[in-house]
Amino acid sequence: MRNIKCLIIGGGPAAYTAAIYACRAALKPTVVEGPEPGGQLMTSTRIENYPGFAEGCDAQSLMMDMRKQALNLGTEFISSSARECDLEAKTVSLENGETLSFTTLVIATGASAKYLGLESEKRFIGMGVSACATCDGFFYRGLKVAVVGGGDSACEEALYLSGLAEKVYMIVRKDYLRASMAMQERVRKTENIEILFGCVTEEILGDAMGVKGARLKRNGEIFEISIDGFFLSIGRHPNTEWLGGQLPLDENSYIVSDGVKTSKKGVFVAGDVRNTDFRQVVTAAADGCRAALEAEKYIKNEL
Ligand code: NDP
């Protein structure tokens, strides 16, 4: 079995930054980057709050440049996902059948889109139901769409879609948006976005051709909207199942850690998969840096 000094699981800013720092520390990192290299940000559009870009930057290019930087410095990438691990034996088994042994492990598996859990939602996935406006928005040029959620992501998705679709409904379950004031302001100023406050989706309506509408409930009143696309933006679920309960998780399944240190020696955690108040690109990248530096310190001082 191959032993890897610094094994990094994940494919977002935390993982790529950990790889960059691990390369510079001569830890010869291997990154198991999962099915979607680039992570959550590949579904995003512009980033205006990552330092160093005076005019903002394209989210996907930022991710691909981070990946390239890690590659240029000597990172090995494996295109597979972690299936399970044994943190005592220090091994990780991958979906491709390979098992890797590690000296240090950086867990940076991030979080994936949540769905409402409706039967009709499952039925129309890929036929009008999507959790990625930037991936699928193109198909809704000149049509009507809805975005569920009232956070920054939902606003971002709605703003992106407003440039393509004729009309964008935001379906928000509370009577206010959770998004930052700057984002709220932009949404409110966009004429073809209509916010439906206090609304819960009862069902997504459609036929063999795909989504045609949604049935909503507001204060006991049921009504329908006519739409061609239904976008979910209601938060994320951390990708921690493959850990099989070997690390303590909080009530939302995020890894409980002391900074980037987990309760297991030599095992570190970075980015959105850990229990943290901040889920920004810059904080994920900073976590990746700290995790790699902790891995270096662990190898130097504790082995
Ligand atoms: P959030 O958790 O901030 O928001 C989730 C939204 O979905 C809330 O409005 C929530 O409603 C709603 N929601 C959750 N579950 C359901 C449900 N079952 N049915 C209907 N609505 C539901 O997630 P985001 O993904 O928006 O953001 C995550 C983090 O990333 C935040 O810290 C955000 O600030 C950050 N972010 C920053 C960006 C930027 O700076 N450019 C861009 C995108 C995200 P309720 O309010 O009622 O709980």
Image (cartoon, rainbow, N blue to C red):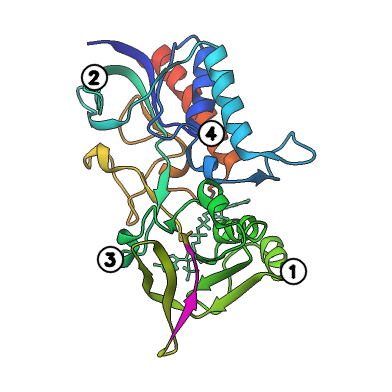
How far apart marks 3 and 2 lie (CA) works out to 35 Å
Give the left or right position of residue 121, taking residue 172 as reference. Answer: left
**Quadrant the C terminus occupies:** top left
Where does the magenta region start and end?
223-229
* Residue on which the image places disc 3: 119
Task: Give the amino acid type for the residue marked by disc 4 in the picture.
Answer: Pro
- Which of discs 2 and 4 lies nearer the camera? The answer is 2
Name which of mark 4 and mark 1 comes first in the sequence: 4
Name which of mark 1 and mark 3 comes first in the sequence: 3
Give the left or right position of residue 152, taking residue 33 as reference. Answer: right
Name which of mark 2 and mark 1 comes first in the sequence: 2
Q: Residues within 10 Å of mark 4 (few under 14, many from 20)?
A: many
* Residue on which the image places disc 1: 189
- Which of discs 1 and 3 lies nearer the camera? The answer is 3
* Residue on which the image places disc 4: 13
Task: Give the amino acid type for the residue marked by disc 3 in the picture.
Answer: Glu
Q: Quadrant of residue 192?
A: bottom right
Instruction: Tell me the SS state at disc 4.
Output: helix
Report the predominant secondary structure element of the magenta stretch. strand
How far apart marks 2 and 1 lie (CA) works out to 52 Å
Task: Give the amino acid type for the residue marked by disc 1 in the picture.
Answer: Lys
Give the left or right position of residue 41, taking residue 48 as reference. Answer: left
* Residue on which the image places disc 2: 98
The reply to whether residue 133 is visible in this rendering is: no
Name which of mark 4 and mark 3 comes first in the sequence: 4
Q: Does the beta carbon of the residue at mark 1 sit less than 8 Å from ligand 1?
A: no
